[in-house]
Image (cartoon, rainbow, N blue to C red):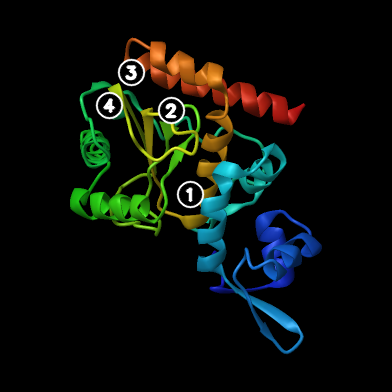
Amino acid sequence: MTLSPTMMLDEVASYLSMTEREVLKLVRSGQLPATKQGESWRFLREEVDHWLEEQIPHFPSRELHGVEKAPAFLGGKPIGGKSVPILEDLLIPAGVELNAHARTRASVLEELVNVLDRTQRLQDPDSLLTAVREREDLVTTALDGGVAIPHPRKRLDWVVTDESLVFVRTVRGIPFGAEDGALTDLFFLLVCRDDRRHLQVLARMSRILKDNEFLQDLRCCDDSEEVCALLRAREESLVSHLRN
């Protein structure tokens, strides 16, 4: 299924899991880009995606759940649409580095790309590194609690063979632009081949990474298998709660 590049008000409301009134409020306040043609509002899906991507880390749980549930499509087949695990195949042991000595934003981004490269899922390291740097130049992906989720802003479906998540823990915290002013030592690189899937995974990760106990557990992990198991268990706990 190919989503239209231009969307109507009702389509955007469904896409964002909001009411039309909530969408119009965002438009009239200047937060959500849109143009009016006659009596109708028109939205560019790329602009909606960019807005949503920047807002996701700040969304409360209800809005995050709405983004997670909205269906995405890969190869014409629906994915998502209900509360199911979506992270279990993204992070593998080869994609985990627990003792990175990076001390700057530039060096930790290089480390993340290098770790993804060793999973054999990465086909174009240079393009990915450039895209991730450009995304960080726009606005930091650092969250409170010492964690960040670097990612490309635009879909780069030729860069990876499979959607991927990489985890790097640095020996020392790095200034990464977090709003709380804290240093960042936990980094997840996210690369998806579909825009909507990217937003779903970003929403799920944002929800999980709001859990300070989980972040502390990540800091105590001794090996990559433990990290992967911890993420799977935390997501399964979250999904089970959403089902009930």
Which residue is label 2 attached to?
146
The reply to whether the C-beta atoms of the residues labelled 1 and 4 are less than 8 Å apart is: no
Q: Earlier in the sequence, mark 1 or mark 4?
A: 4
Name the image quarter holding the N terminus: bottom right
Q: Position of residue 124 (x, y in %)?
A: 21, 52
Q: Position of residue 106 (x, y in %)?
A: 23, 42
For the residue marked with disc 2, what is the amino acid?
A: Gly
Which residue is label 1 attached to?
198
Q: Secondary structure at mark 2?
A: loop
Q: Position of residue 155 (x, y in %)?
A: 39, 58
For the residue marked with disc 3, what is the amino acid?
A: Ser
**Crowdedness of circle 3 by 10 Å Cα count: few (<14), some, many (20+)?**
some
Q: Residue at x 27, y 36 (%)?
A: 112
Is residue 74 at all visible to an observer of this figure?
no
Q: Earlier in the sequence, mark 3 or mark 1?
A: 1
Question: Label 4 to label 2, Cα distance in Å?
Answer: 23 Å
Question: Label 2 to label 3, Cα distance in Å?
Answer: 19 Å
For residue 54, side relative to residue 183 (left or right) = right
Name the image quarter holding the C terminus: top right
**Crowdedness of circle 1 by 10 Å Cα count: few (<14), some, many (20+)?**
many
Which residue is label 4 attached to?
94
Q: Earlier in the sequence, mark 4 or mark 3?
A: 4
Q: Residue at x 20, y 24 (%)?
A: 101
Question: Label 3 to label 1, Cα distance in Å?
Answer: 23 Å
Which residue is label 3 attached to?
224
For the residue marked with disc 4, what is the amino acid?
A: Ala
Q: Residue at x 23, y 38 (%)?
A: 120
Question: Label 2 to label 1, Cα distance in Å?
Answer: 22 Å
Question: Label 1 to label 4, Cα distance in Å?
Answer: 21 Å
Mark nearest the camera among 2 and 1 is 2
